[in-house]
Image: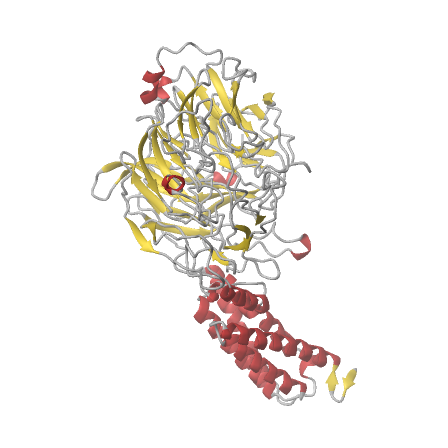
């Protein structure tokens, strides 16, 4: 026998040393955690493992019995903390299970007496662990298994002026429904979908581009033509049946790596002859001189322009603006390239183009304005303004006056009610986002709100604020969805669904902004618990909470922490206790504050799909904590470079007494510290405002190096991009960190089909029909700051033949 000491094999010494190291780590880390007010279990585990190791190295069978007791106690402790949740239990069990396998080997117990009963006890505990983990995969406690009671009607309601076969706006309608009446592809045959065609844009990120170079586009389709924009804002027209390019317009984008975004989510379309689509504004457009481009595509560019392109030939509309362009930087304070950056398609009515744009986050307190503007749809002349930071938001700029700097901006897609000529504007916070000590009432008045404006005049009808004095970047990040909802008492109410990063879904009467679903003002944290209090800052005493909320329930605790193993899970619990965290709206701090929901929010720009025929909504909420840490400023620093280039890492916030560092909440191994799931799909009954079903979505297949590939188990990963649904009872969504397009049954959330994409699908799909054949299209181009595989693929799927 090969030994290195009296009676001890090399296997026993190595195994014993590993057990001692794990025990010491658990003991020291456990004492630290307990001292911070956390669980004592790790410290007790460390003591028990040290005792077991000492007995095992002395060839005492009692060491095996003690280890069997550790396994049984850990089994029970894990179930008590998390329930039968596979992914939450796995790091609590994995190392101890592997060490148990070693102890079951004959080489580990050579020289021991009467080991069989002890090994049977260990094996029984380990089999129980496997059984519990297996049950957690089959019956997931985080999922909701319900079914909608109302079936899809046989006939979908038409939308006036919108052909069933088309997808003429970013959300199919300007009201952001993301729902199609097409039903050729349905829950029975969706499994048969195959690639119909692939279009390669040829537009790739270069070394001179922003980190936030993304492919987020949702194409639009009118007649037999698709229109889409690329990250460098090439505008392509494609044959909708074959994907063949018909023409390309090159805007000669002037971009560089200081731009915070290089993104185009979509374009807008206007047909001067389709007055049916916009009945309320069509009358206001009467008497206009005919345009050289009666059919035009409106293209926003990230260097601050809006371009009108002839939809028939791809040429600039020379009678629009200056040779087809509007300079959106005009009358901007502190203007610089990329400082004002329109990333979402504008709303287009019969008479007016309404456009907002993003402003560089967390760079300085001397930034451009977040003004929303209305332009004449034929000439491009400025008709009205709504400056969210001005005393009179409708005051037109003059030769000597400019818009209000750092006013709240509207970077997400807007929504429009064609029946009433009202545009609904989702706004964010005036930058810098994470410190608001210098924000006066005017900068706060319309921040983090939805504004209802007369689309032809820009006059305010009502507004509703979703977060007061925002210090967490809790923008209204998505296009609101408009739908007439039937309440439980049988009344039909014109509703607007306002999604927020907090997870609140505010359901308002779009005639007056009053809540349909109850909204309650609740007290929120008011002080920094660890570290110095923030200079010159104040906090809103209450925040609004909707009764319809898709955020994870309750506050995080250290039980919610995660890791690949027991060891980094323990460290995440310690780190969690070191940060400031007292639930949502915990103030930012120099010590570091855990922000949950994090900067990505529960909802992002993808929005949700609403089916008015069935009175249901489909969404893909996420939940990933971030950490914000205020950094006291260096008084000698200078503003040396314009633009931030990214939305994470250290942000300077020039002019504020602090910079800020924004990071995901990760373990020492780089994994999320919060246990999964981090992403779901969900179905909501809009009459009862209850979540009927919820399922995890996505795997970590594309998040690990190929050497460490695991079975593609459903874990629930974050996503960027939204869902669509159809009268075929199918929900389509990509968005996730793994490269898939998936189809779910609208009725109960069952996964019906998934297709491997050639790159990241951080976009919202769309669907349409040509010559009687229905297609589903997704942009698979990846996302620079989300870390998915980059590409240039537009992929169309259809049923065979």
Up-down relation of residue 120 to residue 360 (above or below) = below
Residue 482: % across, % down: 35, 35
The quarter in which the C terminus is drawn is top right
Left or right: 602, with 483 as reference point: right
Residue at screen point 34% across, 46% down:
148
State how the image is colored.
Answer: secondary structure
Query: Residue 798: in sight, yes or no?
Result: no
Residue 234: % across, % down: 59, 26
Q: Residue furthest left?
A: 489
Residue at screen point 66% across, 57% down:
708
Left or right: 161, with 711 as reference point: left
The quarter in which the N terminus is drawn is bottom right
Left or right: 57, with 557 as reference point: right
Front one among 422 and 631: 631
Residue 672: % across, % down: 55, 57
Up-down relation of residue 13 to residue 406 (above or below) = below
Residue 219: % across, % down: 51, 30
Among the 4 quarters of the image, the one containing residue 46: bottom right
Front one among 67 and 499: 499
Front one among 676 and 351: 351
């Amino acid at each position: 026998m090969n030994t290195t000491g009296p009676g001890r094999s090399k296997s026993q010494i190595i195994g014993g040393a590993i057990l001692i190291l794990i025990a010491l780590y658990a003991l020291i880390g456990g004492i630290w955690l307990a001292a911070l007010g956390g669980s004592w279990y790790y410290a007790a585990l460390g003591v028990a493992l040290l005792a077991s190791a000492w007995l095992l190295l002395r060839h005492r069978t009692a060491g095996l019995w003690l280890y069997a007791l550790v396994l049984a106690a850990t089994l029970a402790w894990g179930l008590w903390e998390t329930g039968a949740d596979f992914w939450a239990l796995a790091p609590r069990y994995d190392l101890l299970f592997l060490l148990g396998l070693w102890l079951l080997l004959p080489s580990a117990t050579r020289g021991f007496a009467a080991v069989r009963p002890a090994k049977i006890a260990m094996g029984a505990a380990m089999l129980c662990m496997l059984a519990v983990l297996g049950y957690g995969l089959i019956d997931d406690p985080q999922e909701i298994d319900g079914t909608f009671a109302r079936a899809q009607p046989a006939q979908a309601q038409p939308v006036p002026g919108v052909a069933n076969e088309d997808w003429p706006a970013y959300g199919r309608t300007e009201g952001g429904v993301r729902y199609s009446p097409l039903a050729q592809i349905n829950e029975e045959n969706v499994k048969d979908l195959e690639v119909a065609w692939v279009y390669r844009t040829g537009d790739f990120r270069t070394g001179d581009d922003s980190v936030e170079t993304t492919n987020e586009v949702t194409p639009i389709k009118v007649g037999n033509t698709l229109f889409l924009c690329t990250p460098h804002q090439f505008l392509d027209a494609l044959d909708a049946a074959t994907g063949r390019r018909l023409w390309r317009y090159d805007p000669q984008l002037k971009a560089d790596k200081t731009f915070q975004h290089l993104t185009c989510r979509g374009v807008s379309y206007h047909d001067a002859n389709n007055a049916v689509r916009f009945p309320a504004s069509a009358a206001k457009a009467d008497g206009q001189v005919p345009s050289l481009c009666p059919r035009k595509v409106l293209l926003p560019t990230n260097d601050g322009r809006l371009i009108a392109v002839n939809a028939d030939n791809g040429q600039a509309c020379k009678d629009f603006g200056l040779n087809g362009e509007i300079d959106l930087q005009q009358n901007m304070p502190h203007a610089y390239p990329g400082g004002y950056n329109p990333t979402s398609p504008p709303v287009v009515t019969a008479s007016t183009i309404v456009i907002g744009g993003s402003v560089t986050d967390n760079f300085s307190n001397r930034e451009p304005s977040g003004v929303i503007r209305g332009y004449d749809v034929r000439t491009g002349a400025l008709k009205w303004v709504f400056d969210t930071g001005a005393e009179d938001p409708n005051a037109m700029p003059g030769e000597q006056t400019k818009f209000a700097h750092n006013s709240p901006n509207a970077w997400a897609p807007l929504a429009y009610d064609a029946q009433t000529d009202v545009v609904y504007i989702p706004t964010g916070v005036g930058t810098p986002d994470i410190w608001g000590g210098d924000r006066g009432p005017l900068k706060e008045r319309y921040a983090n709100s939805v504004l209802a404006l007369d689309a032809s005049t820009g006059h305010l009808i009502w507004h509703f604020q979703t977060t007061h004095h925002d210090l967490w970047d809790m923008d209204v990040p998505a296009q609101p969805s408009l739908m007439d909802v039937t309440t439980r008492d049988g009344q039909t109410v014109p509703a607007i669904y306002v999604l927020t990063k907090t997870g609140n879904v505010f359901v308002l009467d779009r005639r007056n902004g009053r809540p349909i679903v109850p909204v309650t003002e609740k007290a929120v944290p008011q002080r920094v618990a660890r570290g110095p209090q923030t200079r010159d800052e104040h906090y809103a005493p209450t925040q609004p909470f909707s009764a319809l909320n898709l955020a994870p329930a309750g506050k995080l605790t250290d039980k919610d922490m995660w890791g690949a193993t027991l060891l980094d899970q323990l460290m995440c619990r310690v780190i969690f206790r070191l940060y400031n965290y007292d639930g949502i709206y915990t103030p930012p701090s120099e010590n570091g504050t855990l922000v949950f929901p994090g900067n990505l929010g529960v909802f992002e720009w993808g929005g949700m799909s609403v089916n008015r025929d069935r009175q249901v909504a489909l969404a893909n909420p996420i939940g990933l904590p971030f950490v914000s840490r205020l950094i006291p400023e260096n008084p000698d620093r200078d503003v040396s470079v314009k633009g931030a280039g990214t939305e994470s890492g250290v942000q300077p916030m020039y002019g504020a007494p602090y910079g800020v560092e924004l990071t995901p909440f990760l373990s020492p191994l780089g994994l999320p510290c919060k246990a999964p799931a981090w992403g779901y799909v969900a179905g909501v009954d809009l009459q009862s405002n209850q979540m009927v079903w919820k399922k995890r979505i996505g795997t970590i297949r594309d998040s690990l190096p190929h050497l460490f590939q695991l079975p593609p188990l459903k874990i629930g990963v974050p996503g960027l991009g939204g869902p669509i649904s159809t009268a075929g009872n199918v929900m389509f969504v990509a968005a996730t960190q793994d490269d898939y397009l998936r189809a779910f049954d609208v009725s109960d959330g069952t996964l019906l089909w998934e297709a491997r994409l050639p790159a990241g699908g951080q976009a919202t799909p769309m669907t349409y029909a040509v010559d009687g054949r229905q297609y589903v299209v997704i942009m698979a181009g990846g996302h620079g700051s989300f870390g998915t595989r980059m590409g240039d693929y537009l992929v169309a799927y259809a049923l065979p033949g």
